[in-house]
Image: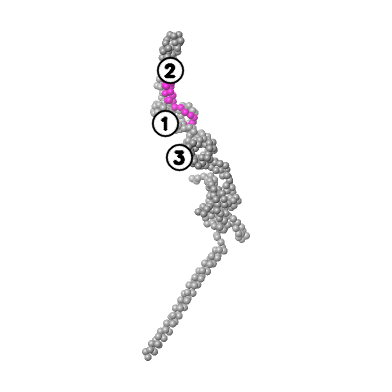
């Protein structure tokens, strides 16, 4: 009896559990089906996006372009130097004295021998007159002794004494005259006087600098070049000199001297050039940039430096070539080419190999380019392409 009851109770519990188990199974099936649909939809979407992008191609890039041409290049050496007067001196006197009169004016052009300044010299001139009188007397005595010696009225020893006295008195006159001359400051050469800051009545010590005198037409420029280019320079070679003070103006000159030795500490050689300066614009002490033509003129394919992309694999330029027509209109697309670059000048670089005259190259906007990228050309703004650019203020 008990066994029958237990079997009934077990049958009733299993019948109660079976609907719950079925619901759980159907729910799990539904979850798996839903997850499968979600995954399938995402895969389908990814495939369709890839298919669309593959069909659409790369988006067009806006660039600037130019047609490649060959230009003339003149090999040049560049250097920096300092200007020096053709003749220049700080004037001073050899003697002390009180300034009597100043004849020179600031900035005045003077000729060689012109009187620039005089010191008080009245006492010295009076002394010169006294010595000159003594010399004249000694001359008369000497001439009289010469006549007396001829008739043997005096001894030869007496005549020699009067001759020596005359010579001594003449030497004293010359010495005093030289002292008087030292108190007159004269221009040792033709040139331009600097700022004159002395005044009459001022006491001057010997050796004290009073004014400058400079000859600046023509004017020297001193500069150095590395020993590696010594073979490219020679005397009388033309140079052009530029100073920041005068913008684009260049002053022409020629090499006048090349040092016969190389500085062992820098391995540079000193060079001197003489530059024409008729307007006296260039002044001693100015800094100058120089260009020296070296060798024969060459011809290179020339492009702006912005057209070249430099990377570890080499230098790259993008060519704008004709691609497949779209909607009946010709289209341009980018083509990457590796090039060999040469010398540079200003904003330009020479291309030795990789492109040819007549090619259309991309000069800016190539950052996002790759082979086959469609191009939209806009040349309203183009990169700098100047062989001698001017620095911007």
- Distance from disc 3 to disc 2, alpha carbons, whole Å, reads 56 Å
Asked whether 105 or 185 is in front, the reply is: 185
Asked whether 207 or 71 is in front, the reply is: 71
Q: Is residue 201 visible?
A: no
The structure's colour scheme is one colour
Residue 210, given in percent of the width and then of the height, sits at 42, 31
48 is higher (above) or lower (below) than 22: above
Asked whether 106 or 388 is in front, the reply is: 388
Rendered image: mark on residue 167: 2
Residue at the limit of the structure toward the left, as seen here:
2
260 is higher (above) or lower (below) than 123: below
Count neighbours of disc 1 (C-alpha within 10 A) and say few if under 14, some if 14 to 19, many if 20 or more: some
Q: Give the residues drawn in magenta, as a range.
A: 168-193
Q: Is residue 183 in the magenta section?
A: yes
Count neighbours of disc 3 (C-alpha within 10 A) and say few if under 14, some if 14 to 19, many if 20 or more: few
- Distance from disc 3 to disc 1, alpha carbons, whole Å, reads 36 Å
Q: Is residue 233 visible?
A: yes
144 is higher (above) or lower (below) than 332: above
Residue 145, given in percent of the width and then of the height, sits at 43, 11
Classify residue 121 by image quadrant. top left
Asked whether 141 or 314 is in front, the reply is: 314
100 is higher (above) or lower (below) than 377: above
- Distance from disc 2 to disc 1, alpha carbons, whole Å, reads 37 Å
Mark 3 or 2: the one toward you? 3
Rendered image: mark on residue 209: 1
The residue drawn where x is 44% and y is 9% is 152
Marks 2 & 1, CB-CB < 8 Å contact: no
**Which circle's residue, 3 or 2, is located before the other in the chain?**
2
Instruction: Name the residue carrying label 3.
Output: 264
The residue drawn where x is 58% and y is 57% is 333
Label 1: state its secondary structure: loop
Residue 20, given in percent of the width and then of the height, sits at 43, 80
């Amino acid at each position: 009896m008990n066994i029958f009851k237990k079997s009934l109770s077990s049958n009733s519990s299993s019948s109660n559990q079976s609907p719950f188990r079925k619901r759980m199974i159907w729910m799990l099936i539904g979850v798996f089906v839903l997850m499968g649909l979600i995954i399938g939809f995402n895969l389908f979407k990814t495939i369709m996006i890839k298919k669309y992008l593959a069909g659409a191609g790369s988006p067009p890039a806006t660039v600037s372009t130019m047609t490649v041409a060959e230009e003339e290049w003149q090999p040049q050496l560049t250097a920096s130097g300092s200007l020096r007067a053709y003749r220049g001196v700080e004037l001073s006197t050899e003697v002390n004295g009180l300034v009597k009169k100043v004849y020179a004016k600031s900035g005045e052009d003077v000729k060689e021998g012109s009187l620039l300044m005089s010191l008080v010299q009245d006492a010295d001139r009076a002394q010169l007159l006294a010595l000159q009188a003594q010399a004249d007397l000694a001359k008369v005595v000497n001439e009289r002794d010469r006549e007396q010696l001829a008739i043997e009225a005096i001894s030869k020893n007496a005549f020699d004494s009067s001759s020596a006295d005359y010579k001594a008195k003449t030497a004293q006159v010359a010495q005093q005259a030289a002292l008087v001359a030292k108190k007159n400051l004269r221009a040792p050469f033709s040139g331009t006087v600097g700022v004159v800051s002395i005044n009459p009545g001022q006491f001057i010590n010997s050796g004290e600098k009073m004014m400058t005198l400079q000859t600046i037409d023509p004017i020297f420029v001193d500069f150095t070049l590395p020993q590696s280019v010594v073979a490219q320079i020679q005397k009388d070679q033309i140079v052009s000199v530029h100073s920041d003070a005068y913008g684009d103006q260049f002053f022409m000159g020629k090499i006048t001297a090349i040092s016969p030795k190389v500085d062992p500490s820098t391995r540079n050689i000193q060079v001197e050039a003489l530059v024409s300066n008729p307007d006296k614009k260039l002044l001693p002490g100015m800094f100058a940039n120089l260009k020296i033509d070296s060798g024969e003129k060459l011809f290179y394919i020339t492009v702006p430096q912005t057209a070249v992309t430099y990377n570890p694999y080499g230098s790259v330029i993008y060519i704008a070539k004709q691609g497949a027509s779209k909607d009946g209109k010709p289209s341009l697309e980018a083509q990457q080419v590796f090039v060999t670059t040469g010398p540079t000048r200003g904003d330009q670089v020479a291309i030795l190999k990789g492109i040819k005259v007549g090619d259309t190259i991309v000069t800016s906007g190539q950052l996002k380019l790759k082979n086959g990228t469609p191009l939209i050309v806009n040349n309203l703004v183009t990169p700098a392409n100047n062989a001698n650019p001017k620095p911007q203020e």
